[in-house]
Amino acid sequence: MLEPCTYVIFGATGNLAQKKLMPALYHLEQAGRLPEGMRVLGIGRRDWDDETWRKTVEDWLTPRARSGLDAEVFARFRERLFFFQGDINDDASYARLQMLLNGPDYPSNIAFYMSVAPAEFAVVSNGLAAAGLNRDDDGWRRMVLEKPFGYDLESAEILNKRLHRHWREDQIFRIDHYLGKGTIQNILVFRFANLMLEPLWNRNYIDHVQIIHAESAGIEQRAGYYDGAGALRDMVQSHLLQMLTLVAMEPPANLDAECLRDEKVKVLRSIRPIPQSAVHAHAFRAQYGRGNIGKEKVGGYLDEKGVPPQSTTETYAALKVYIDNWRWRNVPFYLRTGKRMAQSTSQISIRFKHPPQQLFRETQIDQLKPNWLLMGIQPNECLRLELQVKQPGLEMVAETQRLDAATCGVSQYGIDAYEALLLDVIDGDHSLFLRFDEVSWAWRVVDPILKVWATERDFIHSYPAGSWGPQEANRLFVREDQDWRNTLEDE
Ligand code: BG6
């Protein structure tokens, strides 16, 4: 049973709270997973009282609650919600907050969730510490930090030092919500609970690996953040590299957070550094122009509110990396992400090599298709294996058959990644959160690319909104028979 606690959300009126945090907490309420007496204190500058906050949350949840907002569940949930008007730059706000939290109404175990701009992490963590809210002599005190953790290696190191002035590592939870997704958690089970995969999981049998995240949405109202970040920082440095570590890691000694993270760090450290002179051979960037998403005409990135007219920020990034260890040497890992793409889909696709002998050359099976193992992350959670089999009939003709795990299909469990992760924070489990060395090695992978791109500000490739991105990105492939696997269906 989880201990009662208080979730304090900085940036409670923002996009993340609206789309992810409050729906996740509500669904945990519905599932009966929130501890008795737990409270959620939203913090923002707006002149709101508890009732305004509760009404706002109700409006947010109405379109987002799975199978509609349940009045009874929400009645329970709203009793947990409170609002605190405060300014993160004002010392007096932290002193008032401290008085409130140390009062009798709030459980003394407290998680502070930083749903604020990354530049403000240090401000809030200092403010909390100055008010003594980092001290855990009476109940635990934890801090959850959203990504990106820094803007590059150097800023990440500075931020980390600042946090450590007042917070111990075991109090810090660096979230990467991809680690809470069903299929991502399944990678470890699938790899390490099945003997048959392990002999094949290496450079002898795997041709290449693709890790792809595409979104049909644009940047929405996030120009302020996104234009300074770009796709490489926003998705690749964090989510995509994390997925890569799970696909590529060695079996950990056990499932302890430290053992798991040790293995992930080993993978990141083994990624072959990309020298600045080789950036163009390894990385490709582009920006969406005007186009159509389904039947709707949409503007380009430069038409988005708040984006400077000359911006060359990438909304699409593709990257080729190699992991220089015994298992993976010379197997390309292709990572790709884009906004305003043809569909919203994320998947990991593993292509196996061709059999060594072309036994069927003289038959109608002229060109055998390779085996693929596909791991659908969203919208469908799926594990799919594609095999070649003979078509029924007199002719010797092969076709692709798919073996799907029974869970394939639009996820019937519909658990959002944040639900699992918010509970892990209460439970004090760091397994699905990032240790600083993971973050810093991930920055080392992308830093040379960021540096080169930052100096090339006068041109960026573009792709029409609603497409799968620019053809030119295909230059990353090392062989002509390699191509992007965009969805679970295409071949
Ligand atoms: C966030 C990025 O971390 O992940 C967003 O900042 C992106 O730009 C989002 O849209 C994607 O998450 P999900 O869970 O919707 O795939």
Image: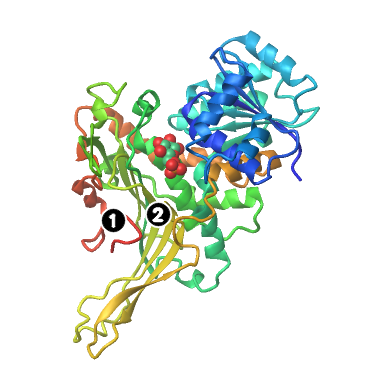
- Residue 352: name its quadrant: bottom left
- Dot 1 falls on a residue whose secondary structure is loop
446 sits to left or right of 263: left
The type of residue carrying mark 1 is: Trp
Q: How many discs mark residues in the rendered view?
A: 2
Q: Earlier in the sequence, mark 1 or mark 2?
A: 2
Residue sitting at x 44%, y 46%: 241
Residue 484 sits above or below residue 18 on the image: below
Q: Find residue 484 and name its label.
A: 1
| Vertical order, 366 against 40 (above or below) | below
**Residues tagged 1 and 2 counted as in contact (Cβ below 8 A):** no
* Residue 444 visible at all: no
Q: Where 90 falls versus 27 (above or below)?
A: above
- Mark 2 closeness class: few <14, some 14–19, many ≥20 residues within 10 Å: many
Q: Is mark 2 within 8 Å of ligand 1?
A: no
The amino acid marked with disc number 2 is: Gln
Q: Which residue is drawn at the image coordinates 52% and 21% (left, top)?
A: 120
- Depth order, front residue of 96/82: 82
35 vs 203, left or right, is right
Q: Is residue 487 visible?
A: yes
Q: Position of residue 107 (x, y in %)?
A: 76, 29
Q: Residue furthest front?
A: 71
Q: Residue at x 33, y 80 (%)?
A: 389
The local crowd at label 1, few if under 14, some if 14 to 19, many if 20 or more residues have their Cα within 10 Å, is: some
Does dot 2 land on a helix, a strand or a loop?
Answer: strand
Residue 72 image position (x, y, % from top left): 65, 38
* Ligand 1 lies in quarter: top left
**How far, Cα to Cα, is label 1 from label 2?**
11 Å
Q: Which mark is residue 437?
A: none
Q: Is residue 56 above or below residue 256?
A: above
Determine which residue is flagged by label 2. 347
